[in-house]
Image (cartoon, helix red, strand yellow):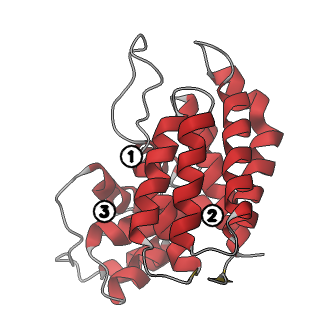
Amino acid sequence: MGESGLNLSKLFGNALEAMTAQREEVNAMDGYNGNHGDNMVENLRLITEALGAKKSQSPAEALKYASQQLQSQGQGGTSKYYAEGLAQAASQFQGRSGVDGGDVMSLVQTLMSAIPAEGHPQQDQAGGSVLDVLGGLSRQQAPPQQQGDGLDIGDVLGLLGGQQSQPQQQDDGVDVGDVLEALAPAGLAFLQAKQSGSDTKTAATQALLGALMGGQVNPFQANTPRAAAGGVVVQSLLKALTK
């Protein structure tokens, strides 16, 4: 089956380039073996080469093959989680002949949700997935631009952490849409997703990805090398969509 749409191998090639450039920074965050960046470079190389080898196949087949290669040849304990995420994404893309930008956003979400943020059992680290940690960074690093209703983009992205509060119009007449537009691009991404019919958590995730794409989130402020490396991967994949 001929591939149409975006080239997955080239997309992950961008992630490989970014990780290669920042491998030492990631290594420095790894207080256990000091090689997480090195492992991620090798794992992304495996993924890129596997996707390239199956570029004439469907996205599902290519992602499944990349998952298998990573499962058997991946470096470090994190490789198995990336393999699981790729396998989940392969299942989601069954029957598709190609992928577009929206599919890449979905792939990123699936992949990062599959990776626990903890480095290893000996470390006292917060739980959750890499996506959860990046969402937390968005809340910490978002500029303090609040309107009269007190809602900021951190509140919106807090939904990723399981908060149940819903954005609502307040008594002072300030519309939440106006607030979110003032927090562009992340807030605007949330608003647009909601207007297109996305549920709140999906919209909040898209807002997080928008913040990562726009460089508003520094993944190296994460508390784990996994989350930092994951942030580098996410940013490089999303930025490749704009090229």
Residue type for callout 1: Asp
**Residues at discs 3 and 2 in contact (Cβ within 8 Å):** no
Q: Position of residue 99 (x, y in %)?
A: 57, 79
Mark 1 or mark 3: whose residue is earlier in sequence: 1
The tally of labels here is: 3
Q: Which residue lies under the disc numbered 2?
A: 213
Q: Is residue 130 above or below residue 160?
A: above
Identify the element where label 3 is drawn.
Answer: loop
Residue 42 visible here: yes
Q: Is residue 15 left or right of residue 111?
A: right
- Report, in whole angstroms, how far the alpha carbon at label 1 lies from the one at label 2: 16 Å
Residue occupying image coordinates x 52% and y 29%: 224
Q: In this view, does 122 lie above or below 231?
A: above
Q: Position of residue 213 (x, y in %)?
A: 63, 64
Q: Which residue lies furthest to the front in this view?
A: 1
- Report, in whole angstroms, how far the alpha carbon at label 1 lies from the one at label 3: 23 Å
Q: In which quarter of the image is residue 230?
A: top right
Identify the element where label 1 is drawn.
Answer: helix
Q: Which residue lies under the disc numbered 3?
A: 150
Residue type for callout 3: Gly
Residue 132 circle label: 1
Q: Is residue 194 left or right of residue 233?
A: left
Q: Label 3 crowding class (10 Å Cα cut-off): few <14, some 14-19, many 20+?
A: few
Q: Label 2 crowding class (10 Å Cα cut-off): few <14, some 14-19, many 20+?
A: many
Residue type for callout 2: Met
Identify the element where label 2 is drawn.
Answer: helix
Of residues 194 and 104, the one nearer the viewer is: 104
Residue occupying image coordinates x 45% and y 19%: 120
Which quarter of the figure is the C terminus placed in?
bottom right
Between marks 3 and 2 in the image, the one whose residue lies nearer the viewer? 2
Q: In this view, does 196 lie to the left or right of 86?
A: left
